[in-house]
Amino acid sequence: MKRIGVLTSGGDAPGMNAAIRAVVRTSIYNDIEVFGIKHGYSGLIDKDILPMTVYSVADIIQRGGTILNTSRCKFFMTEAGRKQGVAVLKEFGIDVLIVIGGDGSYKGALELSRLGIEVIGIPGTIDNDIGSTDYTIGFDTAVSTALDAVSKIRDTSSSHNRVNIVEVMGRNCGDIALYAGIAGGAEYIIIPEVQYDIDSVCEKILRGKERGKLHSIVIVAEGAGDFKEITEAVQQQTRVATRGTNLGYIQRGGSPTGPDRILASRMGYMAVECVKNNNTNCVISIRNNQYITIPIEDALEMKKEINLELYNIANILSI
Ligand code: F6P
């Protein structure tokens, strides 16, 4: 029987613990030995590896972060680093490595597969920026967190009749901004995938004000612009009091939502089923509500598409 290693890599995301739990419990249920590798690829190189038991993952399904810790390991991006990783996996007798992380982590896994290690990827990142899956673990929670913050900002924005610019995370992907924007009734959503000009943002704010709107919320994805510059430009052009907030790391923390826990549990379970069926060197994805596997090499070629229909709906509803 194969021996499994599991690690989390890149930015942490709520729901990673639920995925670890599912991998560990499904392995043990099937009498497969499973090892937790701490601190992502750095811990692999440093042999920071421990056997996992049913109890190692008790009481973690509701916890944010990752009990295995995580890192972005520069050394692992070199061939020497990856070869060292392979040597450690061999030393521990680990045949299959399950990597929970984003695109960067998948790239590391692909390189390992080229060196003879079997790998399986599980998409874990708040950014929802992985082309091969409709949803990543952590995205739903991050949207809920951003939405909660936007609703609070709306209270004070409306009391003071201000414009509030809110920057959210997402790297080069506008999904957190788009989903939090449509659900939060934002007046304008600025995302990297759609060109915007500051004049049209200001015109929309002023049009709303003329119609009697007491305040406006603009959500900016971090990859689309700097919230400070946008705040200054809006204040100058509209002459309406404007304030800016960067939500920052609160979006990465907190207890995962129900949908994230379910996504993580199903994906973790499925990864171990794949090991049992000798279906490795693949990633687990959800597409059109179906759980599927995609060869890791193909998955990394897939481009993330923004949902333009949703973007247009958000624009119409905030007219
Ligand atoms: O990938 C998740 C993410 O939170 C991005 O949204 C953000 O750009 C980045 O990580 C921040 O990374 P770090 O933790 O290295 O500051």
Image: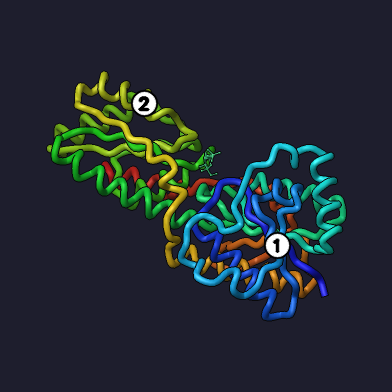
Left or right: where 314 falls relative to 194: left
Q: Amino acid at mark 1?
A: Leu
Left or right: where 240 falls relative to 59: left
- Taking depth in this image into account, of 116 and 57 the one nearest to the observer is 57
Evaluate whether residue 297 shows in this view.
Answer: no
Residue 154, x across and y down, in percent: 23, 44
Residue 267, x across and y down, in percent: 61, 66
Residue 79: give its label: none
Contact (CB < 8 A) between labels 1 and 2?
no
Q: Which residue is mark 2?
A: 228
Residue 50: give its label: 1
Q: Secondary structure at mark 2?
A: helix
Residue 26, x across and y down, in percent: 65, 75
Count all numbered tags in the image, as a single digit. Answer: 2
Q: Amino acid at mark 2?
A: Lys
Rendered image coloring scheme:
rainbow
Left or right: where 174 falls relative to 145: right
Inter-mark Cα distance, 1 to 2 = 45 Å
